[in-house]
């Protein structure tokens, strides 16, 4: 079991996808279409955020739900970049790179959701919380 989100191979793929999309967001033509740019940037940022939020949930069912949300955000980024391609803001090569990273990532997320749904772990997140040391008590003043 992973003790941190960063230990999951899926997380490394999320970061790779996020980095590729973030690099693409520097394309001047795409930056000029502020609404499309903002939609892509927000969906892209939500992927990692939902993964982290899910990892911190107490159950695998709750984690699976947020991985599923992240999977939806991944699909949104891909479709919005396809729109950017149709508007000629990005090249064929740029779109191909995102699709080649994003579609397998979505499948990995789907597989991970299935795994989490069958694992039934109900104590996620508590493994990293150390008990607080007790402070010595002082006798009351008289």
Image (cartoon, helix red, strand yellow):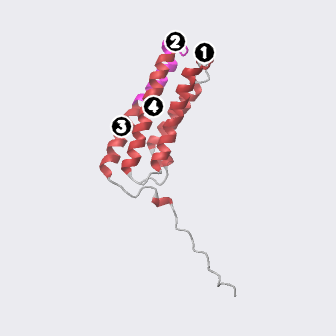
Q: Which one is in front, 13 or 45?
A: 45
Q: Which residue is mark 1?
A: 29
Mark found first going from the N terminus, 3 or 4: 4
> Would residue 92 be visible to someone looking at this image?
no
Can you tell which quarter of the image residue 58 is in?
bottom left
Classify 10 Å Cα crowding around label 2: few (below 14), some (14-19), many (20 and above).
few
| Mark 4, residue position | 74
Residue shown at 42% from the left, 28% from the top: 75
Question: Which residue shows up at 42% across the image and 32% down it?
Answer: 72
Q: Which residue in the protein does label 2 denote?
A: 87
Is 107 magenta? The answer is no
The residue under label 3 is 110
Magenta-drawn stretch, dominant element (helix, strand or loop): helix
From the viewer's perspective, is the residue at label 2 or at label 3 nearer? 2
Helix, strand or loop at label 4? It is: helix
- x 42%, y 41%: residue: 67
Residue 4: % across, % down: 49, 51
- The answer to whether residue 127 of the structure is visible from this angle is yes
Residue at 55%, 68% (x, y): give it: 132
Q: What SS does tag 3 mark?
A: helix
Q: Compute the Cα span from label 4 to label 1.
A: 22 Å
**Do the numbered discs 2 and 1 sit on residues whose CB atoms are within 8 Å?**
yes
Q: Residue furthest left?
A: 118
Q: What range of the chain is rendered magenta?
A: 85-103
How far across and how far down the image is residue 123, in percent?
40, 58
Label 3 crowd (10 A; few <14 / some 14-19 / many >=20): some
């Amino acid at each position: 079991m992973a003790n941190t989100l960063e230990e999951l191979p899926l997380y490394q793929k999320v970061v790779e996808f996020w980095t590729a999309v973030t690099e693409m967001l520097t394309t001047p033509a795409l930056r000029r279409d502020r609404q499309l740019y903002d939609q892509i940037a927000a969906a892209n940022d939500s992927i990692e955020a939902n993964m982290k939020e899910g990892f911190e949930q107490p159950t695998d069912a709750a984690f699976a739900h947020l991985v599923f949300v992240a999977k939806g955000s991944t699909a949104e980024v891909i479709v919005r970049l396809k729109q950017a391609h149709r508007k000629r803001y990005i090249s064929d090569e740029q779109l191909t790179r995102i699709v080649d990273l994003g579609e397998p990532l979505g499948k990995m997320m789907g597989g991970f959701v299935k795994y989490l749904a069958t694992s039934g772990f109900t104590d996620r997140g508590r493994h990293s919380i150390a008990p607080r040391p007790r402070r010595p008590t002082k006798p009351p003043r008289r």
